[in-house]
Amino acid sequence: MKTIFLILITLFAITSCSHNKDEKLQKKLNAIWSEYYVEDFNQTKNVNILVVTNRKSKNNGFGCNNDSFGVVLDSVTRFGICEISVPKNHVIGEINLAKDNRQSSNDFFKISSAKSLQETDLINFLKKSDRTALIFVHGFNVQYQEAVLRAAQIAYDLKYQGPVILFTWPAGAGGGFIDESLMNKTYANNLNNAKNSISVFQNFLIDLAKNKIRANLIVHSMGHQIALPALDYLGKEKPKTHFVNELILNAPDFDLQEFNRSISNIKKSSKHITLYCSNNDKAMIASKTFNNSSLRVGACGLSNDLDNINVSLVDNETLGLGHGYYSSREILSDVSQALLGVDVKKRLFIKKSEPFGNEKYFLR
């Protein structure tokens, strides 16, 4: 009996020692992921989007389609919540809205409900959450409905576990369409609206900070004309307050020289910054010409104070302007790792740039 007992003890010791470092870490990570990823995004799911907008209301009410808000700037900021059904079968990066309820919920986006809120309601909603909020600021020529659906798509595909906030400003063409002859006019109007939205966004971030609410921030294109000046001001005026946790900059339509002048203050207001840029981005070339300026940040102008990632290798310019990559599978996969706090050098498919390149890293 004693011999059998010794054999069992020996086998147990051998078995215990056979667990290598990877197996031990995997066990710890499994427990962490189970706690981190609570919400299930494997099926068609209703996603709540908290809306903050300075678009002028068309009907003095709140809704989630283009009948509710247009492209005119308002002095009033409105708040609400849109419940969007995101189909499990959607192609990542695409947002096809159902024309009627007879179309499959597994294949088409649907607007489930809309509710107006007061800012205090929205703040209280965020305060009750024990997860970090995510703010999305869209770019140029984005109608209201598209902005809402895009926020829902990004939230779903990131499997984002916290509250999602859309800051939607008056972007888009006046008639709901855009063609080459109206491009410059629409761009000028959108740019003017963006600059007139800075203080609104800035004050919203201040309100969040007053209530000890931190957020991750994802910005696209001309939305940087709002977010970056706001963060520059906040970093200068309140340098000890981190208003933003992870700051994700996608294809910034922003002057490189101005960016480099303000980056020190932006860093003070943000915990960490990731910048995605592309040499294929035709919109950056057009913007440079329109603004009669230096290189745009989204065209991969080097800045040493952030993780500057060139996505030209995964952004296929033959499919369009090379400007809409921010909602694609490749970018969202990397954004997900950034939001988890994974160091850029340890993330999948990241490689170091060549010496003297206009970026630090490539996404391949």
Image (cartoon, rainbow, N blue to C red):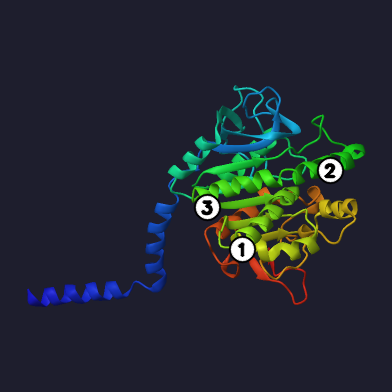
As helix, strand or loop, the secondary structure at mark 1 comes to: helix
Residue 192 lies in what quarter of the image? top right
Q: Which dot marks residue 214?
A: 3
Locate the C terminus by quadrant: bottom right
First of labels 1, 3 by sequence position: 3
Amino acid at circle 1: Lys
Q: Which residue is mark 1?
A: 268
The count of marks equals 3
What is the C-alpha distance between the residues marked 3 and 2?
32 Å
Q: Residues within 10 Å of mark 2 (few under 14, many from 20)?
A: some
- Answer left or right for 253 relative to 28: right
Residue at left 56%, top 46%? 207
**CB within 8 Å, label 1 to label 2:** no
Question: Of discs 3 and 2, which sits in the foreground?
Answer: 3
First of labels 1, 2 by sequence position: 2
Q: Nearer the viewer, residue 48 or 171?
A: 171
Inspect this view and state whether residue 199 appears. Answer: yes
**CB within 8 Å, label 1 to label 3:** no
Amino acid at circle 2: Tyr
Q: Which dot marks residue 246?
A: none
Task: Give coordinates of residue 59: x percent, y percent.
Answer: 68, 22
Inspect this view and state whether residue 309 appears. Answer: no
Q: Nearer the viewer, residue 22 or 307?
A: 307
Question: Of discs 1 and 3, which sits in the foreground?
Answer: 1
- Answer left or right for 213 relative to 205: left
Q: Residue furthest front?
A: 237
As helix, strand or loop, the secondary structure at mark 2 comes to: helix
Task: Give coordinates of residue 149: x percent, y percent.
Answer: 64, 37
Q: Which residue is mark 2?
A: 187
Residue at left 23%, top 72%? 12
